[in-house]
Amino acid sequence: MQLLCQLDDIKEGHSRGFNIGDIAIIAIIKEQQLYLYRNRCPHRGINLEWLPDQFLDADRQLIQCATHGALFLIHSGQCVQGPCLGQSLEAIPFTVSEGAVFIDLKSDQPTDTPRLDSED
Ligand code: FES
């Protein structure tokens, strides 16, 4: 496992980009849930954003690729509109421990996306 960031580095309803070595990562918190994906559009294999940390559409309800406008569900990474319809962003397994986010770039297993609040 590798430290990505502190949980406080990502604001509720917003996205951030990170680079770990040559791997670009998208982090989003929506409704107290953290989602991590590789920053690589399945259409052309390039980064999604054209401005730093800007991965969401205008309503901040979907992940948007800036190049051709593909839209992806935040909770699954599945493309629901655009040239890569039906394909998905690659989820990155992670754990949250003592306010820090750790990623597992070697694992092929998807994360169980633990909730960040204390209700569960
Ligand atoms: S590169 Fe993302 S939609 Fe074409």
Image (cartoon, rainbow, N blue to C red):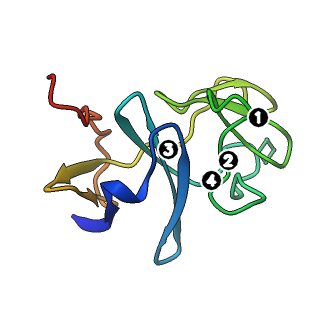
Of the image marks 2 and 1, the number of the one nearer the N terminus: 2
- Given contact means CB atoms under 8 Å apart, are the residues at marks 1 and 4 in contact? no
Where residue 103 appears, x then y in whole percent?
30, 58
- Given contact means CB atoms under 8 Å apart, are the residues at marks 2 and 1 in contact? yes
**Does any atom of ligand 1 lie closer than 8 Å to the CB of label 2?**
yes
- Which residue is more in the foreground, 11 or 65? 11
Q: Residue furthest right?
A: 68
Q: For residue 98, what is the image quadrant?
A: bottom left
Quick one: quadrant of the C terminus?
Answer: top left
Q: Identify the disc placed on residue 70.
A: 1
**Does any atom of ligand 1 lie closer than 8 Å to the CB of label 3?**
no
Horizontal side, residue 15 vs residue 97: left or right:
right
**Does any atom of ligand 1 lie closer than 8 Å to the CB of label 1?**
yes
Q: Amino acid at mark 1?
A: Ala
Where residue 39 appears, x then y in whole percent?
58, 54
- Which residue is more in the foreground, 37 or 109? 37
Q: Amino acid at mark 2?
A: Cys
Within 10 angstroms of label 1, few (less than 14), some, or many (20 or more) residues?
many
| Residue at the disc numbered 4 | 40
Under circle 1, the secondary element is loop
Horizontal side, residue 39 vs residue 37: left or right:
right
- Which residue is more in the foreground, 4 or 85? 4
**Does any atom of ligand 1 lie closer than 8 Å to the CB of label 4?**
no
Q: Identify the disc placed on residue 41.
A: 2
Of the image marks 2 and 3, the number of the one nearer the N terminus: 2
